[in-house]
Amino acid sequence: MSAHWKSFLWAQLQKNIQKQGLSSCYMALALATPSVRTVVFRSFAGEHHRDSLGWTSDALVVTTDRRSRKCKELQHDRRYEVCWYMDGTGEQFRLKGSVAIYPPPQQDSSSSSMMPSVNPSNIAPTSPSQQSLGTQAFMAYRQSHGIDPHVFDWEAERRRHFGLLDDALRATFASSQPKPAALPITAVDPLTGWYVSPDHQAALDDAYTNFVILVMTVKEMDYVSLEGAHEIYTV
């Protein structure tokens, strides 16, 4: 069962998306050192706003480039604080906790043990004909690699988020020069669970090597509304 803070946050986010659109997913992320940036909430790990993957968790997912400054800062201190203001309903959510990088940096062997738990949900997965490309890759990777159905796989989750990026943003992860303006994906190879991009396959493969997900565990949520409500949720 989801933590109470998550259920409340998710319900309020849906209201804000209906009123303000996907701009409601932008939140300010501060790491332990005085450093803050705007990031996009992608989903809770193992969950999607439309597809059901058969999993549920209380961990937030943000995507980034392994070459970014934030990844270097996180190798020294995993703590974070998020300030998330939802203009549609006039509410502010401040989250505190720790961040795990996946895949972990080569010199950091502790990250794998820091990954939060993701549990099977009681909702059946979306039928294959209705799945997004990201969900197709998630399912195909698990099946092609013989993943235990009761074990959540973080590589499958990483692939899912890579496929959910828009084509232009996906291209920014490429190392090759000149960088392509976009990296479209046309299909998922069911034998490997990897994406197909007939005109840009090499660049797509290269871009993925720089793509990581930041998985954020929440220890505390401080909630304030313009109407005067104030509550602190602790885990």
Image (cartoon, helix red, strand yellow):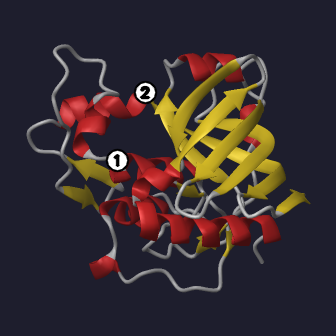
Q: Residue at x 59, y 64 (%)?
A: 89
Query: Residue 135 in the image: x percent, y percent?
Result: 40, 65
- Disc ID at residue 165: 1
- Residue at coordinates 77% horizontally, 56% vertically from top-left? 224
Q: Judge whether residue 227 can be spotted in this image.
A: yes
| Residue sitting at x 41%, y 56% | 22
- Distance between the alpha carbons at the discs numbered 2 and 1: 14 Å
Q: Quadrant of residue 45?
A: bottom right
Numbered tag placed on residue 173 in the rendering? none
Q: Is 57 situated left or right of 18 in this image?
A: right
Q: Does residue 23 sit above or below 72 in this rendering?
A: below
Foreground disc of the pair 2, 1: 1
Please name whichever residue, 35 or 90, is drawn nearer the observer in this view of the structure: 90
Q: Amino acid at mark 1?
A: Leu
- Would residue 187 be found to the left or right of residue 11 on screen? left
Q: Nearer the viewer, residue 189 or 181?
A: 181
Which residue in the structure is indicated by mark 2? 210
- Mark 2 crowdedness (10 Å alpha carbons): few <14, some 14-19, many ≥20: some
Location of residue 36 in the rendering, given as x and y in whole percent from the top left corner: 63, 25
Residue 68, position as x, y percentages in the image:
51, 19
Of pointers 2 and 1, the one earlier in the residue sequence = 1
Q: Secondary structure at mark 1?
A: loop
What amino acid type is highlighted by mark number 2?
A: Asn
